[in-house]
Every structure is written in C-alpha cells, then in structure tokens.
Image (tube, helix red, strand yellow):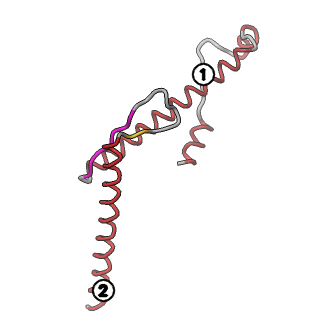
Amino acid sequence: MQEECAMTEATQIFLLPGLTLDSTKETMSPAAPKTQESVQLSNKLMLEKQQEEAEWESINVLLMNHGLQSLCLVKRPDIKDLILFDKQSSQRMRQNLKTLMEETVRQQNMIQELIENNQKL
C-alpha cells in the first residue's frame, strides 16, 4: 500500500488554469505560493481519501460476492486522515474476518486430508 502511495505522489501533477511560469513570477504575491501549496495539499488529501473509499467499495463487492456482509464507511469531511466505520460495520468486519479465518483452517484441513489420502493410494 505504501508503494502505491509513493508512486501516486511521484506521478501526480497539479495544474492551475491560466498560470504559466512567466505569469506566476509577475502576478503572484509572496503569499500565493503558500496558498498554492495549501490547495495542492488539500487536493492531494481529497484524492487519497477518494481512492481509499473506492478501494473499500471494491472490497465490499468482493465481500458480497463471497457471501459476506458489506461494510459502511462513515463519511466525515472534517476528518481527513481517517476512514471510519459505524458500529454495525465494525461488527461485520470482525465477523467477516472470523469467517475467513475459519474457512482458511477448514480448507487447510481438507488439503491435508487429501494429501494423506493420496499418499495411501
């Protein structure tokens, strides 16, 4: 996940309409670069949050395709660095993880039995 973020940061370009290198030197006040940096940071954070929400939506599709319950994100614009789930989704997430772990153990046991039966043949 961190590699994906690093790649996104390295390849992301912010463009503001009507600004060129020459025009920025002539018309921008000393405070303008800080404002531009603030806008860029805000845009970057918003994009990262949208990407993470899209990833969770993809996870929800996979969960439902496997017969598990989907999760609900709590969308709070005032919280930029966190993804929140409601209590019901938190409970569903715990149950989904428990189900996945139990299913993994069941499959491992089945594979072990198949290996043992195959060796007997």
| Left or right position of 112 against 32 | left
Image position, residue 27 (x, y; %):
72, 8
* Residue 27 to residue 65: above or below: above
- Horizontal side of residue 29 vs 73, given as left or right: right
Magenta segment boundaries in residue numbering: 68-74
Q: Quadrant of residue 40?
A: top right
Distance of label 1 from label 2 (alpha carbons): 62 Å
The residue drawn where x is 26% and y is 54% is 66
Residue placed at 52% from the left, 48% from the top? 1
Q: SS at mark 1?
A: helix
Q: Nearer the viewer, mark 1 or mark 2?
A: 1
- 89 or 112, which is in the foreground? 89
Q: Is residue 36 above or below residue 110?
A: above
Total numbered badges shown on the rendered structure: 2
Q: Earlier in the sequence, mark 1 or mark 2?
A: 1
Residue located beneath label 2 in the image: 116
Q: Main secondary structure of the magenta part?
A: loop
Q: Secondary structure at mark 2?
A: helix
The residue furthest front is 87
What residue is at 68 percent from the left and 15 percent from the top?
20
Could you classify mark 2 by the number of other residues whose Cα lies within 10 Å: few (under 14), some (14-19), or many (20 or more)? few
Question: Would you place residue 6 above or below residue 116 in this image?
Answer: above
- Residue beneath the point at 36% across and 46% down: 90
- Disc 1 residue type (three-letter): Val
| Quadrant into which the C terminus falls | bottom left
Q: Read off the residue under disc 1.
A: 39
Answer above or below: position of 81 versus 28.
Answer: below
Task: Reply yes or no: does residue 82 show up in magenta.
Answer: no
- Outermost bottom residue: 120
Identify residue type, mark 2: Glu
Residue 86: x and y in percent read 35, 39
